[in-house]
Image (spheres, rainbow, N blue to C red):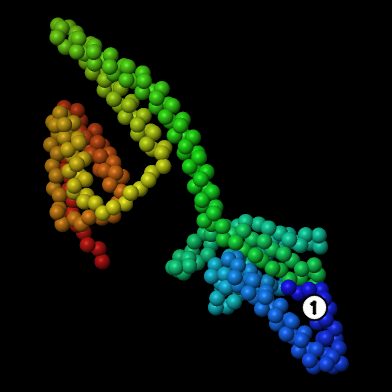
Amino acid sequence: MFTDGLSQITKYTIEKIDKVPQDAVVKVLEALLQERELFWEFFVSINRAVIVEDANGKILFHNPYAVKWGVVDKNSLVVSDEFRKVFDEIKSNFSSEILTFEVQRVVKVKDVIVPSIMRERVFEILCVASSLPEKRKYMYLLNDVTERRKEELDENQRRVMSSIDTLLTGIAHELKNPLSSIYFHAQVLKRSLENTKDSTRRITNSVDVILYEVNRLNKLVNDFIQSLRPSRFVEKYEDVNLIIREVSEMLLEDVSSKGIFLELVLDDSVPEFLCDREVIKILILNLLRNAIEAIEEGRGGRILISTSATIKD
């Protein structure tokens, strides 16, 4: 550190350089060198970007992190355009009373691994200015807090989703109880009416509608709950043909009851690919359901599912 004593000795030595003994000058220079090495060791070792510049934006000092994080261009050794805008904004806040300023900014910087890609990073920036306006220097201390901010946001999201999950569980409970009761009594009523006269057929049909609507509402509730819960993808190499066969078997009874012919033309050369099995399963299931609903009731029809492998250059 530059102590007041050393500063005074240095000033005196410079002013009286022609009268100061050579060994005394050497001692002052050695002390200055030690101070410089101490500063350099400190600023190089910390995991922060440090930049010192004058009032005109000329860099007087920077440490390796300033280059690594893209604050200083490694070729021209000037502050990058994105950070220059931030630094100029910070400078405009200084006055004779305000000599420190702290701010947090999102800045686009080059990716460390793939420099051609620009990524947004969050930086905490502390700037300290020297007290003399005519010879003002600025020291910027930057900390990349992107990961910390992401963890904070993830934690907040987890809390919100936990609250939503609790709310949804309560709603689902309140909805499913009456639905289960309606479904049970409708089944009992239907069995009681099945062996009676034909005049009760209309009542039986109404019960069928009740059962159908209860099932539909139950599905809507389940789909709604799943849609609001955060997805947890589990990626593995999967056989899409196998997934299609599984989904087709699930809907086979529904398809047959509506007189629809389901045809599978699956290419065995299709390679396995990296995906979340359940997500692909839901996608195929929804596509098939849409196809089934598009076919008019009682008219029958044909649904064709085919796969093939395409090689792209």
Mark 1: amino acid: Leu
The quadrant in which residue 79 appears is: bottom right
Name the residue at 49% across, 43% down: 157
User: In this rendering, does residue 166 appear at all?
Assistant: yes
Q: For this view, does 197 lie left or right of residue 45?
A: left
Q: With 101 as the anchor, is 178 left or right in this view?
A: left
Q: Residue at x 29, y 18 (%)?
A: 183
Compared across the picture, whether 163 is left or right of 7 comes to: left
Q: Is residue 81 visible?
A: no
State the image coordinates of residue 282 (x, y, percent, origin top left): 28, 41
Q: Is residue 156 left or right of residue 276?
A: right
Q: Is residue 180 above or below residue 5?
A: above
Q: Which residue matches tag 1?
A: 6
Query: Could you classify mark 1 by the number of other residues whose Cα lies within 10 Å: few (under 14), some (14-19), or many (20 or more)?
Result: some
Residue at image coords 67%, 74% = 39
Q: Between residue 35 and residue 94, name the one nearer to us.
A: 35
Comparing 118 with 301, the one in front is: 118
Q: Give coordinates of residue 19: x percent, y percent.
A: 86, 92
